[in-house]
Image (cartoon, rainbow, N blue to C red):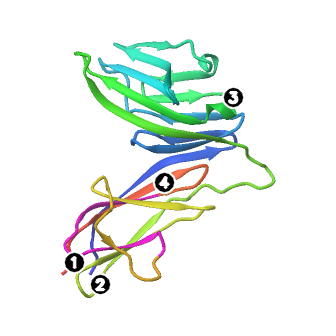
């Protein structure tokens, strides 16, 4: 019996030459860029609201303020990367040009409401890597999810994608999966949900230049 009610595919990131884009709206996102290229990080869906947005680079014991957006006014701070950045308030995308090795690191996004109360914090890790034209890495392709009901009411779900060196992670209703069983011989792209579990299951596939996610609504098996 099929255990699927709906399907949603979300493109999380892609690379074209030395230009790389990454959906960094999820807390804990990992994004990759090519040395000397341009990185586009979508930090928030829309930054035109009447609230304050701050974007920092975090180092050990210190934070460097990169930009501030408040009441439709954008200020690029006097940071070491000031001349290489731009922020698109209409779609919440941060652009970093001519990337350097020391651009790698942890970044922090904070939003505040009109009363100055912190409403959202999102962290991301940026990796700037050397690319070799003679040894290209293929981005992960749009994944497919397959599910089947097992004899004792469990649901086995497999996630498949093309590309080089894919890494898989799973969430159920936005939470990292904890209550799962893994059958002997299962790979990281296959999980077995215990009987009674249901909800929106998401498989995220990443490699060093792109990430893609696919979601399915999982219902109870008989």
| Mark 3 neighbour density, 10 Å: few (under 14) some (14–19) many (20 or more) | some
Task: Identify the disc placed on residue 58.
Answer: none
- Please report whichever mark, 3 or 4, sits nearer to the chain's N-terminal start: 3
Please tell me in which quadrant of the rendered image residue 162 appears.
Answer: bottom right
Which residue is tagged 1? 221
* Residue 142 picture location, percent across and down: 50, 59
Residue at the (37%, 27%) spot, across then down:
110
Q: CA distance from mark 4 to mark 1?
A: 27 Å
Residue topped by disc 3: 98
Which of the two discs, 4 and 2, sits closer to the camera?
A: 2
Q: CA distance from mark 3 to mark 4?
A: 25 Å
- Contact, mark 1 vs mark 3 (Cβ under 8 Å): no
- N-term mark: 4 or 1: 4
The magenta segment is: 187-204
Membership of 196 in magenta stretch: yes
Q: Residue furthest bottom?
A: 151
Task: Return the residue at label 2.
Answer: 150
Whichever of callouts 3 and 2 sits on the residue coming sooner in the sequence is 3
Instruction: Give the x, y percent position of residue 83.
Output: 63, 16
Q: Quadrant of the C terminus?
A: bottom left
User: 13 or 110: nearer the eye?
Assistant: 110
Say what secondary structure mark 1 lies in.
Answer: loop
Disc 4 element: strand
**Residue 212 - label:** 4
112 horizontally vs 108: left or right: left
Q: CA distance from mark 3 to mark 2?
A: 51 Å
Question: How far apart are the alpha carbons under marks 1 and 3?
Answer: 52 Å
């Amino acid at each position: 019996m099929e255990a699927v009610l709906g399907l949603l595919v979300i493109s999380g990131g892609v690379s074209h030459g030395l230009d790389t884009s990454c959906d960094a709206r999820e807390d804990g996102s990992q994004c990759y860029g090519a040395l000397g290229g341009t990185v586009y990080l979508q930090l928030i869906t829309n930054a035109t609201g009447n609230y304050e947005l701050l974007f920092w680079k975090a180092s050990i014991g210190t934070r460097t303020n990169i930009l501030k957006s408040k009441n439709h006014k954008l200020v690029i701070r006097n940071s070491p990367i000031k001349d290489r950045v731009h922020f698109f308030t209409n779609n919440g995308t941060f652009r970093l040009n001519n990337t350097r090795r020391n651009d790698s690191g942890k970044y922090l996004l904070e939003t505040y409401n009109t009363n100055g109360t912190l409403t959202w914090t999102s962290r991301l890790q940026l990796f700037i890597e050397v690319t070799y034209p003679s040894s290209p890495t293929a981005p992960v392709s749009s994944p497919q999810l397959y599910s089947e009901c097992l004899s004792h009411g469990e649901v086995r779900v497999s996630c498949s994608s093309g590309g080089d060196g894919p890494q898989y992670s799973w969430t159920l209703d936005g939470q990292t999966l904890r209550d799962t069983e893994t059958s002997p011989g299962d790979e990281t792209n296959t999980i077995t949900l215990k009987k009674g579990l249901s909800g929106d299951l998401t498989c995220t596939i990443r490699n060093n230049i792109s990430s893609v996610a696919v979601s399915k609504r999982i219902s109870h098996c008989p």
